[in-house]
Image (cartoon, rainbow, N blue to C red):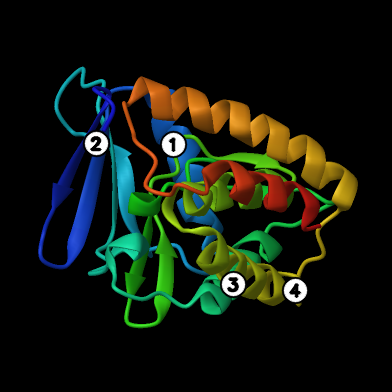
């Protein structure tokens, strides 16, 4: 969590406070859209303390866990969830992209996926979000399981939104650069011995 942000978790709601107004506005923009798979916005604004430079957003609490912490997750259902999230804002081949879709920002409760933490979100091509998300899987799963999961995910996603092969290649390269810089910055390790072959297959799938 950024030093500009503080998260307070209550039994039924979550309140996020911001000392950076730009981060607050970026996240509030997403919650105000009221789109699928995003927790319900309950209240927001500037704190009442005199001369306060602190803003808050309160949403309904999603009592789920990061999907990769579950013993099993349904990649097809997740593909549909991401597509529904993108479709709600899709205009001229661009949509709202989460952009920081690391596993802890995608919560699974029952069979429903929710997306949280939108301080980095932006309007971009959907291929930007998809390629970045799948790089986590390339680092996590061995080749055979990776192929099965990605195939299920993409088949479901493309029942709603078609992905462009030319944009895919460019977005994948950009996502790899961003992904690797962040992994290095936060000292994250790769769990799969098939990372490179997974990435190679990913470059050819669309």
Neighbours of disc 4 within 10 Å: few (<14), some (14-19), many (20+): some
| Mark closer to the observer (4, 3) | 3
- Position of residue 18 measured from the top left corner of the image (x, y, whole percent): 29, 30
Q: From what the image shows, is residue 89 above or below residue 189? A: below
Position of the N terminus, as image quadrant, is top left
- Position of residue 177 measured from the top left corner of the image (x, y, whole percent): 60, 26
| Mark closer to the observer (3, 2) | 3
Task: Using the image, tell me which numbered label, if any, was put on residue 119.
Answer: 1
Task: Using the image, tell me which numbered label, if any, was put on residue 148.
Answer: 3
| Mark closer to the observer (1, 3) | 3
First reached walking from the N terminus: tag 2 or tag 1: 2
First reached walking from the N terminus: tag 2 or tag 4: 2
Badge 4 marks a residue whose secondary structure is: loop
In space, the residues marked 2 and 1 are separated at their CA atoms by 12 Å
Task: Using the image, tell me which numbered label, if any, was put on residue 160.
Answer: 4
Task: Using the image, tell me which numbered label, if any, was put on residue 66.
Answer: none
Neighbours of disc 3 within 10 Å: few (<14), some (14-19), many (20+): few
- Position of residue 137 measured from the top left corner of the image (x, y, whole percent): 49, 54
Q: Residue at x 51, y 68 (%)?
A: 145
- Asked if the residues shown at circle 4 and circle 3 are in contact, with their CB atoms under 8 angstroms apart, the answer is no
In space, the residues marked 1 and 3 are separated at their CA atoms by 31 Å
Task: Using the image, tell me which numbered label, if any, was put on residue 17.
Answer: 2
First reached walking from the N terminus: tag 1 or tag 4: 1
Q: Residue at x 45, y 58 (%)?
A: 141
Badge 3 marks a residue whose secondary structure is: helix
Position of the C terminus, as image quadrant, is bottom right
In space, the residues marked 1 and 4 are separated at their CA atoms by 26 Å
């Amino acid at each position: 969590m950024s030093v500009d942000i503080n998260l307070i978790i209550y039994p039924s709601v979550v309140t996020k406070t911001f000392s950076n107004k730009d981060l607050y506005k970026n996240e509030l923009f997403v919650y105000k859209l009221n789109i699928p798979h995003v927790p319900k916005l309950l209240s927001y604004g500037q704190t009442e303390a005199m001369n306060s430079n602190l803003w808050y957003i309160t949403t309904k609490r999603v009592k789920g866990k990061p999907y990769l912490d579950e013993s099993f997750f349904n990649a097809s259902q997740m593909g549909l969830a991401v597509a529904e999230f993108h479709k709600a804002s899709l205009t001229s081949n661009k949509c709202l992209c989460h952009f920081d879709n690391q596993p802890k920002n995608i919560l699974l409760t029952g069979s429903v996926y929710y997306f949280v933490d939108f301080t980095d979100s932006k309007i971009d091509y959907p291929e930007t979000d998809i390629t970045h998300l799948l790089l986590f899987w390339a680092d996590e799963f061995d080749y055979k399981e990776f192929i099965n999961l990605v195939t299920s995910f993409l088949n479901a996603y493309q029942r709603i939104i078609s992905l462009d092969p030319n944009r895919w290649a460019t977005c994948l390269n950009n996502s790899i650069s961003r992904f690797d810089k962040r992994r290095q910055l936060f000292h994250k390790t790769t769990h799969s011995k098939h990372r490179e072959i997974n990435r190679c297959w990913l470059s050819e799938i669309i």
